[in-house]
Image (tube, helix red, strand yellow):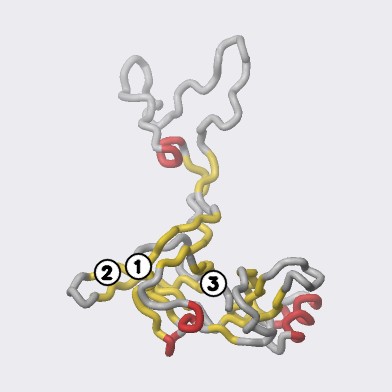
Amino acid sequence: MSSGLIGKKIGMTSVFDDAGNNIACTVIEAGPNLVTQVKTEDGPDGYSAVQLAFDSKPEKNTTKAMQGHFASAGTEPKRKVIEFDRAGDDLKRGDELHPDDVFEEGELIDVVGISKGKGFQGVVKRHGFSGVGMRTHGQSDQQRHPGSVGASADPSRVFKGTRMGGRMGTDRTMIKNLEVVRILPDHNAVLVKGSVPGAKNSYVELHKK
C-alpha cells in the first residue's frame, strides 16, 4: 500500500464531534489516485516506491513522453505525479487508490504544500522586526526600516544570512500531526483538523505517520 496520497485543497469548514465541540477543518479532495508506476529494490530503479498521479488534464498540454507513460498505465494524462514510500507488494500499475484505502478517521498525518506567496516584503512583515522607532531625531521615514546591517572597516561587508527584505512565501511547507477528522468516501474527501499550507485548489501531499 502507498504511504500517502495526492490531494487538492478545497477550502475550510467546521464539524461537531461527539462531545459537541466545533472543530475547524480543511477539506481535501484526495482521490482517486492512479498508480502509474511501481518501483522495487530488485528492479532498475533500485529502491521501493509507488508513483501516484492525480487530477486529469488535456492531452494537448502533455508531452509525448508523459502521454506514453500514462498510456502504459491505462489512464489519461494527469496534472500531478508524486512518489510515495511503498509498504507491501499489493499494488500494481493501473490501480486506483481512494482516501478510505489509505487513511483512517482519528489517525495523525503530515500534510505538505506550497505556502501562499506574499511577494517582496520588508523586514517587519518577513522577520518580525519592530522597525527603527518613532519619528524623532530626523527619522521621518524609518519606522519600518531594518536599520544598520553592515560592520565596520573590518570585515567591510555584510555577512551572509543577514535578515533583510525579500521574497516571502511559496515555500514547501510541512504541517505535522494533523488529525483526520472525517473521511467522505462518496466525495473522495478528507477532513483534516486545522489549516494546511497553500491556497484553495492548490495541490498537497498527505503522508501517513
Amino acid at circle 1 = Lys
Mark positioned earlier in the residue sequence (2 or 1): 2
Residue at 71%, 78% (x, y): give it: 37
For the residues bearing labels 2 and 1, Cβ distance under 8 angstroms: yes
Mark positioned earlier in the residue sequence (3 or 2): 3
The mark closer to the camera, 3 or 2, is 3
Is the residue marked by circle 1 packed among few (<14), some (14-19), or many (20+) residues within 10 Å? many
Q: Is residue 208 visible from the viewing direction of this image?
A: yes
Question: Which residue matches tag 3?
Answer: 4
Is the residue marked by circle 3 packed among few (<14), some (14-19), or many (20+) residues within 10 Å? many
Question: Which residue matches tag 2?
Answer: 23
Residue 103 appears left or right of 4? left
Residue at 50%, 51% (x, y): give it: 169
C-alpha separation, residue under disc 1 versus residue under disc 3: 17 Å
Question: Which residue matches tag 1?
Answer: 193
The percent position of residue 144, horizontal first and vertical second, equals 40, 32
Amino acid at circle 3 = Gly
